[in-house]
């Protein structure tokens, strides 16, 4: 793990997070700037800067956890689709975003946007109590469906 990486510090418990799932190699927690309520990040606990660096077995585990969480999210948030995207844009630690999609634009590319000079902002950070309640709801639903 890296001493300066935000997600490594979260994985070590040095920075608090609203944890939805944790096992020996993986941590799933709420994004503090969610696109939609229930927006979860899944990270390998070990530091890998890029998705392709994650060992295949670990990547498969993250994908399987994402599938389980997606089933729970569909029921909890009454959505037809949950987006699953690996990124590393804001934090150079490979991580997957799991987003309950209420609108097609919840997970998209700027290539689909006709207006080219758009200004993007971070979604607002919900209050800690709201994040804690969401994490509890997802954790309990995930356990019930395991």
Image (cartoon, rainbow, N blue to C red):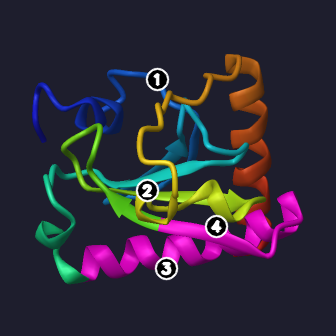
Q: Is residue 90 above or below residue 102?
A: above
- In the figure, is residue 62 to the left or right of 142? left
Where residue 21 appears, x then y in whole percent?
A: 55, 53
Q: Are marks 4 and 1 in contact (CB under 8 Å)?
A: no
Secondary structure at badge 2 equals helix
- Measured along the vertical axis of the image, is residue 28 above or below residue 131? below
The residue sitting at 77% across, 54% down in the picture is 140
Query: On residue 64, which mark appears?
Result: 3
Q: Nearer the viewer, mark 2 or mark 1?
A: 2
- Which label lies toward us, 3 or 2? 2
Measure how far apart labels 2 and 1 are at the Cα level: 32 Å
- Please give the label number shown on residue 16: 1
Q: Secondary structure at mark 3?
A: helix
Disc 3 from disc 2: Cα separation: 28 Å
Q: CA distance from mark 3 to mark 4?
A: 9 Å
Residue that label 2 marks:
110
Mark toward the start of the polypeptide (2 vs 4): 4
User: In the image, what residue occupies the spot 44% across and 61% down?
Assistant: 109
- Vertical order, 116 against 67 (above or below): above
Give the residues in magenta. 57-84
Which residue, given by chain and number where applicable, does mark 4 sit on? 69
Q: Quadrant of residue 11?
A: top left
User: Nearest the camera: 38 or 81?
Assistant: 81
The residues bearing labels 4 and 1 have C-alpha atoms spaced at a distance of 21 Å
- Residue at x-position 37% and y-position 58%: 26
């Amino acid at each position: 793990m890296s001493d300066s990486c935000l997600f490594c510090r979260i994985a070590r418990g040095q920075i608090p997070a609203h944890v939805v799932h944790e096992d020996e190699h993986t941590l799933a927690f709420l994004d503090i700037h969610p696109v939609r309520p229930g927006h979860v990040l899944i990270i390998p606990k070990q530091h890998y800067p890029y998705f392709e660096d994650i060992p295949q077995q670990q990547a498969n585990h993250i994908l399987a956890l994402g599938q389980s969480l997606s089933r729970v999210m569909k029921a909890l948030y009454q959505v037809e689709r949950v987006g699953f995207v690996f990124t590393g844009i804001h934090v150079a630690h490979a991580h997957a975003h799991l987003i309950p999609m209420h609108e097609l634009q919840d997970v998209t590319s700027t290539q689909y946007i006709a207006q080219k000079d758009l200004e993007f902002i971070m979604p607002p950070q919900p209050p800690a109590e709201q994040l804690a309640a969401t994490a509890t709801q997802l954790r309990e639903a995930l356990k019930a469906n395991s």
